[in-house]
Amino acid sequence: MWSKLKFDNIPIFTKIIVTFMIIVLPLFTLSLVLNELGKREVKSQISHSISTTIHYYFANLEKELERVIRAQQTFVNDEDLLKLSSASSILSAYQRSKAINDLTDKLVALKDSSSYIKDITVYIDSMGGVVSTSHLMDQPGIKEEMEAVALATYTNGVPITAWDHRLHLNLTYPTFLLNKDNDWKPPAFIHNIELSQEALAGALASFPQEGGALLFNSNWSLSNDHYPEAIETVRAYVEQREGLSFSTEQVKVGKENYVVVIDSSAFLDATLVFYFPENLLVGQLKTYGTWFWLLVGSSLIIVVLFSYGIYLLIQRPLQMLVRRFRSVEEGNLNTIQMPLRADEFGYLFNRFDHAVKRLRTLIDELYVQKIRLQQSELKQLQMQITPHFLYNSFYILHRLIKHSDNQTAELVSKNLGDYFQFITRNGLEEVALKDEVNHVRSYVEIQNVRFSNRIEVAFGDVPPDCEDIKVPRLILQPLVENVYEHGLGDTIAGGRLQIWFRHEAGQLWFFVQDNGAGMTETEFELLSRQLEGLEEGETTGLVNIQRRLKLRYGDRGGLEVSPGEEKGLIVRIYIPADPTHKGD
C-alpha cells in the first residue's frame, strides 16, 4: 500500500519516461538475441524468397498469357467475326458497319484486359482488310504482314511467335495450310495479338530484389538490363544444361560468383532466369550487425527526443493548467492570457477560461447586477412619483372641477388611479405586454389633458398574437415620459408623439418617436456609448432600461436610439416574440 502511494506521488512525466524505458530495454535485448539467431537463416531464406518470387511471377505470366490465348481462341465462334469472314458480301452496309463496330469493341475489351497486349489485329480475307484496335487498318501491306506472321507461327511454333523483332500470339482460321505446291491457301481470317515487350520487360524490372532477369527461348529473349555483363554467360550456362527446372545455381562470371535462379515453362516454351552477385547477399548479412547498433543508438536519441516532446506536449500544458486551477482556488477570477493552441489542451484552456469568465459573470449577475437592478427599479419608481407630476396632475383636476368639466375630470382621475396602481405593484417584475401598454395609455391620457393643444399623439395597436408576452415592468412608460419632459416639454405648438409596434422574424419592436429638439452630436454620442456599456456616467432612464433588457434577454433584447428624420429622436426596443416568453 505504501509503495503504491509512493508511486502515485511521482509526477506524470516521470512515470511516462520510466514506463517507456521499462518497455524498451527488454525489446532491445530480445532484438539483439533475435538478430544473432536470424543471421543463420537469412541467407537460405533470401534465396528461397527470391526463388518463390520468380516462380510466382512466371506462373502468373504463364496464366495471364494462357488466359489471353483462350480468349483469342473464342473468336473462332464469334458471331460478328463469322459474319464478316463468311457472309460479308450479303450483309447490308449497316449490318457490316455494326458487325465491325461490335467486333472492334470486343477486341478493345480484350486488349484492355491485359497490360501485356500492345495491339490486336484481325485480317478478314473476304473483306480484304483488317479490324484493329489501332491505326493499322489503313497501313499499306498489312495483308502481307499478317500472312508473314502466320507463316512464322507455322514454322517456328506456338504460343509466342517472334517476327520482325516483335512478339505475337497468332490464330489462323481455318488452320494454316499450304497446298501441294507449297502455295499460300488464304484462311477465312487471321487473328493476331502483338505482345507489349515494354510491359514484359517492365515486369522483369519490377522484381522486389535487385538483380538481372532474362526471359528467353531459342527464337527470342527479353531482359531488364541489370548486370548486362553477365547475360551471355548466364544464358550459355542455362542452355548447356537443358532440363533445369526451378533450381538455384552458382555461375562464375569473370572473377565474381553469381547466384542464378532458373525456372522454365513448357506451355510458353521459355525459360526465366534471375541472377545477382553473391556478395550482394553476403554483404547484406554483414551489415545487419552494424545496422542493429545504429538502431540502438538512434533509439536512445529517439527516447530523449520523445521525452522532451512529451514534456512540451503534455507536461508543460498540464503545469500551466494546474497553476491556473490553483489561482482560481485562491479566488483570482481575472482573465489570464493562455497560449493559443489547436489541440485538446487548447480546448481545455479555452473552456477553462470560458468557465472562469462565466463564473465571474454569474457572480456579477447574481449579486452585483441584481443589486443594481433593484436600485434602478427603485429609482425608476421614485422618478414616476415625482412631486412635479403630482402637482401637475392635481392642478389639472382642480382646473377641470373649477370649470365644471366633470367628464374630463372623471377621465383624468380614472387614469391617474390606474397609473399609480400599476407603478406601485412592487411584487411584479414582469407583466403582460397589454398591461404595460395600457399603463402607457393611462399616462398619455393624463398628459393629453395638459398638452391638448400643443402635442398630437398617435398610438398604434399591439399585434394581437403578442399581447400576452411577458415583459419587464416599466420599460415603455419611461420612454414616453422622457419625450414629455425633455423632447416636447417646451413645445408651444405642432408637437408630435408617435408610438407604434411591429412584429417580424420572431422579434417584437416598440417605437417611440417625437419631433422635439433632439440631442446635440456630443450628447447623442455619449448616450450611445453608455447604452453599449463602453462608458460610465449618470445612470439615466434609458440606460436603466437597456441594462434590464440585456439581463432579461441577453443579445436578443435591447434598446436603440437614433435621430429622427427631421428632428427629435426615435427610440426602439426589441425583445423576443416567441411562445417561450408568453405568460400562462
Image: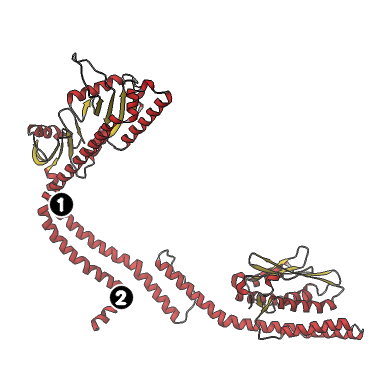
Query: Which percent across, then down, holds residue 541?
Result: 70, 77
Q: Residue at x 51, y 75 (%)?
A: 358
Q: CA distance from mark 2 to mark 1?
A: 42 Å
Whether residue 439 is situated above or below residue 256 in the rendered picture: below
What kind of residue is marked 2? Pro
Query: Which percent across, then down, holds residue 112?
Result: 32, 36
For label 1, the residue is 287
Query: Which percent across, then down, holds residue 113?
Result: 31, 38
Mark 1 residue element: helix
Whether residue 451 is situated above or below residue 41 in the rendered picture: below
Drawn side of residue 18 relative to residue 455, left or right: left
Answer with mark 2 or mark 1, whichever residue precedes in sequence: 2
Q: Look at the image and tell me whether residue 483 can be seen.
A: yes
Between 456 and 568, the one lying in front of the other is 456
Query: Which percent across, then down, holds residue 372?
Result: 62, 82
What kind of residue is marked 1? Thr
Q: Look at the image and tell me whether residue 255 can be seen.
A: no
Q: Residue at x 31, y 73 (%)?
A: 12
